Image (tube, rainbow, N blue to C red):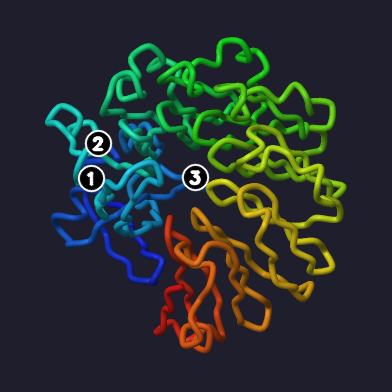
Amino acid sequence: MTIVLNVTLLSGRSFSIAASPESKIQELRWQVQKERGISIRQFVAHGHALAAGTLDENGLKDGEDLLAVLGSAQLVASRHCDDFALIKADGTVHAWGRWRIDGPFQRKLVDVQHITANKAAVAAIVSNGEVVTWGSDGSGGNSYTVAAQLFQIQEVVATIHAFAARRADGKVISWGWPNYGGDSEEVQEQLVNVQSVTASKYSFAALKSDGTVVTWGEGACGGDSSAVQEELQDIKVIVATARAFSALRGDGRVITWGRVVSGGESRAVQLEDIHQICASRNAFSAVKHDGTLVTWGKLAGVVPPALPHHCCELVASDGAFAACLAEGSVVAWGDPRYGGAPTATTAAELRDVTQLCASNYAFTALRADGTDRCCL
């Protein structure tokens, strides 16, 4: 027995395909790719994405309509190392360097949605919400001890030698080197109703739905937030340098903790009426509602430029910051080796900018015409 499904792409193009009700969703994607030459990332029916199971198990009947989302390749890099991985349009992965994938793991890497890496291991979220890991066992490449808990995973973040995964039910699971956040046993009961997890180089900070924060990992590098715990209320955003965290509260105040040299101490600056914060490797910058810039940490001696109040975007390389203003201009400050001092020629080209992106050592600006990218 076969059923006929009506497939529609976002472009409006449509076609029909015949398949067995016992075919799996993954097999249907492969069939479309083989018969139509189209790489499908995801099917949507009945108002939700179809990730796993057979057509019958997903309630698909003869004549049913499916929306198909096309796949697109993604190149993934890590700030912890110089290796790369390519998530292909069909959801398979090709990796280079230390991320190279052995045969047994390659077979598991089907319908990959996202990849996160630390210095010695890699974690990939596949479409059914499970996680596949490889690399150094001690750094999280072996997730056997927590594998049963790694389901319905929404995000994975990494310190230098550990991972933390947030599930759809708001729980967080961590693994890897204990000193780098791989052991969250002491705070596990608190890791519920978590909305997001932020990683420094050595520690994790989890933001809960009630606006409170839970931290673990290397205590001196942000894993211990007990000194500011009473102030960590109504938190909206958390960002991290290599060894410190900053949390923006709903009232515009910023709370910091961790290594002083990395921005964990901010008593020397006025952190009120803040609406945006950003982190480089060892410093933070914040924009106030009046456009005033505040920088603290290893860049504390750098005088940031004055900004109009309409700063649209603030990004950071390892040693500098760049801000995109509403009129499309860009200002940068910090270490010139990291993009903090654009040349006169580059500065003249930084007009009609709509988006900024940062690597470890440089910035790239995308202009409105989409054809000119200027590197700082």
Crowd tier of the residue under label 1, counting other residues whose Cα lies within 10 Å: few below 14, some 14–19, many 20 or above: some
Residue 23 screen position, x and y as percent: 23, 37
Q: Is residue 223 left or right of residue 349?
A: right
Residue 229 screen position, x and y as percent: 78, 26
Residue type at mark 3? His
Q: Mark 1 to mark 2: distance in Å?
A: 6 Å
Find out whether the residues at labels 1 and 2 contact each other: C-beta distance under 8 Å.
yes
Q: Is residue 294 left or right of residue 2?
A: right
Residue on which disc 1 sits: 92
Q: Residue at x 84, y 26 (%)?
A: 230
Work out whether mark 1 precedes mark 3 in sequence or the reverse, and give the earlier one: 3
Crowd tier of the residue under label 2, counting other residues whose Cα lies within 10 Å: few below 14, some 14–19, many 20 or above: many
Between label 2 and label 3, give the one nearer the viewer.
2
- Numbered label attached to residue 109: 2
Q: Residue at x 28, y 50 (%)?
A: 87
Crowd tier of the residue under label 3, counting other residues whose Cα lies within 10 Å: few below 14, some 14–19, many 20 or above: few
Q: Quadrant of residue 27?
A: top left
Residue type at mark 2? Leu
Residue type at mark 1? Thr
- 127 or 78, which lies in front? 78
Residue 172 screen position, x and y as percent: 55, 24
Residue 106 screen position, x and y as percent: 18, 34
